[in-house]
Amino acid sequence: MSATRKGRELPELTPQAALDMLASAINYCQSAGLTVRAANTTGGLLAILIVGCRVDGDRFEVISADMPALTPGSSPVVYEERSE
């Protein structure tokens, strides 16, 4: 077993079992009204986007439930330019 950051023991899982749990969690997010998008990318990467949320350390937070849904051609990435 491996330990979490809080020291709790986690059961051993196969990669497929962990992905099945992730899929279940995504279904819960969608049932709660969050917009979730997933896309396969080149090189065996899976990109998962949750609209109106952010990550803060090891926590996920809702920052706005009123954000517009993603549409084809819209960019989910916001680039900030910095002047130095």
Image: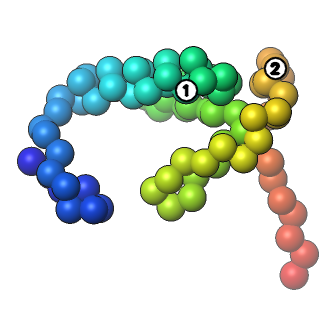
Residue 43 image offset from top left, x and y in percent? 46, 31
Q: Residues within 10 Å of mark 2 (few under 14, many from 20)?
A: few
Residue 12 image offset from top left, x and y in percent? 12, 38
Is 57 left or right of 5, judged from the image as shown? right
The relative height of residue 70 versus residue 9 in the rendered view (above or below) is above
Is 60 left or right of 74, judged from the image as shown? left
Q: How many labels does the image show?
A: 2
Residue that numbered label 1 is attached to: 29
Q: Which residue is most to the right?
A: 83
Q: What element carries label 1?
A: helix
Looking at the rendering, in which quadrant would you find the C terminus?
Answer: bottom right
Q: Which residue is most to the left?
A: 1
Residue 62 image offset from top left, x and y in percent? 66, 43
Question: In percent of the image, x 27 and y 62: which residue is there?
Answer: 6
Residue 82 image offset from top left, x and y in percent? 86, 70
| Residue type of the residue flagged with mark 2 | Thr
| Residue type of the residue flagged with mark 1 | Cys
Residue that numbered label 2 is attached to: 71
The relative height of residue 81 versus residue 64 in the rendered view (above or below) is below
Question: In percent of the image, x 45 and y 56: which residue is there?
Answer: 58
In three-dimensional space, the C-alpha distance between marks 2 and 1, rounded to whole angstroms, equals 19 Å
Q: How crowded is mark 1: few (under 14 residues within 10 Å), some or many (20 or more)?
A: some
Residue 42 appears in view = no
Res 22 quadrant in image: top left
